[in-house]
Amino acid sequence: MSKAFIAAAGAALIALGASGLAWSEHDDDDGDRKGHREGKGLMARGDLARVTNAHYRAECGGCHFAYQPGLLPAASWAQVMGTLDNHFGDDATLDPAVTAELLTYLEGNAADRNDRVRSRAFAARPIQGEGPPRITQTAYFQRKHDEVPVRYVKNNPKVGSFGNCQACHRGADTGDFSEDQVNIPGVGRFED
Ligand code: HEC
Ligand code: HEC
């Protein structure tokens, strides 16, 4: 083996090791690290994949924001779709064929079934709370909103609840939940 080959192989190994490290560093975070914001391609991966299923948008986007599949893990979507007759106090039952189609769509694009860093963050830990799983009861959601005062949410007629993502996140529909796109009605940009 030539010296040059050994040197090249060594360099390749080091490069591999370094990129492996860079990824694991993002695994449990949200794509919000500096490195991610700098490169455009990488930043886009911090966004959630948009809603692409027209039936989903029509059936699940009527009463509230059409939550991206990447906001909950597959098992949670299965629970949500399996309890539509008692959906947070509403009956959201659908035709069985439609329910099956939407479940396939949700599971296939769920937070733990795609590699977007923000989705990974939503899937990172089990969900707390009673009833069907909520995005707002994920550990990541709570960590990101624990400093937002109640008066900006429940007592704010233009918001009402944390489930109303698009009221505060101007880019919600395109999957952009980054801090610099936040605009709380009547409050504006939030500085913590
Ligand atoms: C008839 C109205 C209605 C329809 C249709 C509906 N929902 Fe809901 N959904 C609700 C209500 C009410 C809540 C609770 C809102 C709250 O407490 O802030 C809710 C909450 C949710 C939440 C939890 C949001 C959070 O707080 O994190 C998810 C997830 C959800 N719905 C998914 C779906 C899906 C998927 C569909 C389509 C199969 C759907 N919804 C259709 C009324 C509806
Ligand atoms: C009352 C307004 C409000 C609502 C409603 C709201 N958010 Fe937020 N969200 C914020 C604010 C403010 C921040 C930034 C917090 C900070 O700067 O510490 C934030 C931060 C985030 C972040 C982290 C952004 C980053 O760059 O680190 C994510 C992801 C997020 N929200 C998702 C959601 C989702 C999903 C929903 C709906 C289920 C939602 N938010 C509903 C106000 C809101």
Image: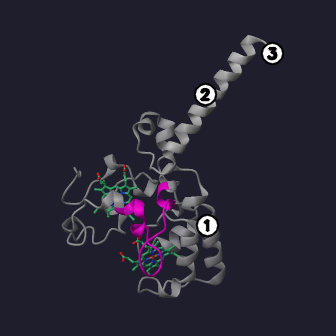
> In the image, what residue occupies the spot 71% across and 22% down?
9
Residue 132 forms part of the magenta stretch: yes
Instruction: Give the image location of residue 49, x and y in percent.
Output: 53, 54
> In the image, what residue occupies the spot 57% across and 62% down?
110
Q: Is the CB of the residue bearing disc 3 within 8 angstroms of ligand 2?
A: no
The region drawn magenta spans: 121-142
Disc 3 on helix, strand or loop? Answer: loop
Looking at the rendering, the quadrant in which ligand 1 lies is bottom left
Q: Return the residue at label 2.
A: 15
Q: Return the residue at label 3.
A: 1
Q: In this rendering, which labeled residue sits more in front, label 1 or label 3?
A: 3
Residue 135 forms part of the magenta stretch: yes
Disc 1 on helix, strand or loop? Answer: helix
Residue sitting nearer the eye, 29 or 94: 29
For marks 1 and 3, the one nearer the N-term is: 3
Q: In this rendering, which labeled residue sits more in front, label 3 or label 2?
A: 3
Q: Amino acid at mark 1?
A: Glu
Residue sitting nearer the eye, 60 or 138: 138
Q: Give the residue at the far right of this rendering.
A: 1
Q: Amino acid at mark 2?
A: Ala
**124 versus 163 height, above or below:** above
Viewport quadrant of the N terminus: top right
Q: Amino acid at mark 3?
A: Met
